[in-house]
Amino acid sequence: MRNWLFNILPPSGIFGMDRDTATITILLIVSIIFIYVLGRILGIILPALFKRIRIRKLERQAEILKSHGVFKKASRLLAPLCFIMLIPFIFPKSDVGDEFYTITIKILFSYLYLTLWIFITGLVSAIGDIISIRNRKSIRGFTQIIQVAVSLIIVILLISMLLDKSPFNVLAGLGASAAVLMLVFKDVLLGFAASVQLSANKMLQVGDWITMPRNKADGTVIEIGLTAVKVRNWDNTIINIPTYDLVSDSYQNWRGMSESGGRRVKRHISIDMQSVVFCDDSMLERFAKINLISDYVAEKIGKIKASPATSTTSPALSERPTNLEIFRIYLERYLENNPDVILEMTHFVRQLQPTPTGIPLELYFFTTTDWIPYENVQSRVFEHVIASVPSFGLRIFQEESDKT
């Protein structure tokens, strides 16, 4: 091809170029046009071919590869690779080492390295997403580390080619400035160490609900990167937390709660101590009509009747329950008969240390982990508790809001 073109050109050359230069220029232009047309044809044929050939098990993976533009980036490698194959047909052996040849080769390989870097980084990102979907575990930190390593290798190869130096000489020069590089890439190095710890110890995954008051984070993890972790707060704001902070500082991960299937409710109401009294016979008769505690109250009445009278009490106060005790037992039975309470998990009602604001009566139980149903269950339970207090002769301690 080259000899034929050289022979048909006039000996004086064309457009001010000698015959050798004109031959090389024409071949370069023809090669560029040929590769461009070939790329356009493949760009039309390949997508149509992939649409017809569908593998059901790999459709999702193919969509991920397509979303990252892996096929398009791979097609861009066609041009420099074809040029490398055509170089021996474009330049004669006598021109090897010529300045024009050297410049062309450097431009060609620079473009090859650039397209290769774009393709590899895109492919690594796509593979990371595929693995994350399959294993339900984010490896974005590792993929970013690989991308950084690939970028560093490409830069070293590019510099060594442009300077006509060995890659090892370039590495030696970089080693001399290691202190500066460590300062520049401090965040990347810290993020790398943190990413390894988070992934290896399964401390954090995409989709986890975390709270970190120091960073004002309270929401779902949407991305784990090399230098930052993105958290979507419940108000739909996005917080970027340095990855290293999740290793060096404390945070709360609610994944264990989600995996257990039950979310804890731990709340109390304060009972006015002055309203706590021993139950008299009329109170016990009234409480005995409540289905949940009728057997318990009947047992207490039986013990009172069987108790011998003393000089100070008739019958003994030691056998007579308080209205607070009856109310506490009622709440325990109420939780045990509540379909929203997970009975396989810990549940009880207890008194806490008395305070100046009364006796705290705490309810402790587990219910659904879904946020809105959880809040509804919690509200219904305590609405019932608050409404039931007066029925047992008790009062909820509440500071006066209005002065009369």
Image (tube, grey):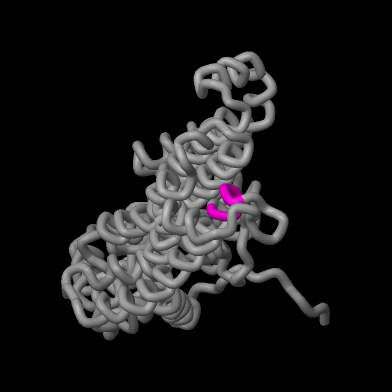
Q: Is residue 377 left or right of residue 94?
A: left
Q: Is residue 141 left or right of residue 289?
A: right
Please determine whether, in this image, residue 394 is positioned above or below residue 7. Answer: below
Choose between 350 and 39: the one closer to the eye. Answer: 39
Give the quarter of the figure containing the C terminus: bottom right
Choose between 380 and 88: the one closer to the eye. Answer: 88
Q: Which residue, as the protein is rendered here, is positioned at the far right?
A: 404
Q: Which residue, as the protein is rendered here, is positioned at the far front?
A: 11
Q: Residue at x 47, y 41 (%)?
A: 92
- Stretch of the chain drawn in magenta: 19-23
Q: Residue at x 55, y 64 (%)?
A: 232
The image quarter in which residue 141 lies: top left
Q: Residue at x 57, y 15 (%)?
A: 172
Please determine whether, in this image, residue 255 is positioned above or below residue 214. Answer: below
Q: Position of residue 281 (x, y in %)?
A: 34, 76
Work out whether residue 206 can be spotted.
Answer: no
Q: Position of residue 291 (x, y in %)?
A: 24, 83
The image quarter in which residue 285 lies: bottom left
Name the magenta segment's main secondary structure. Answer: helix
Work out whether residue 113 can be spotted.
Answer: yes
Q: Position of residue 333 (x, y in %)?
A: 27, 71
Q: Residue at x 59, y 53 (%)?
A: 11
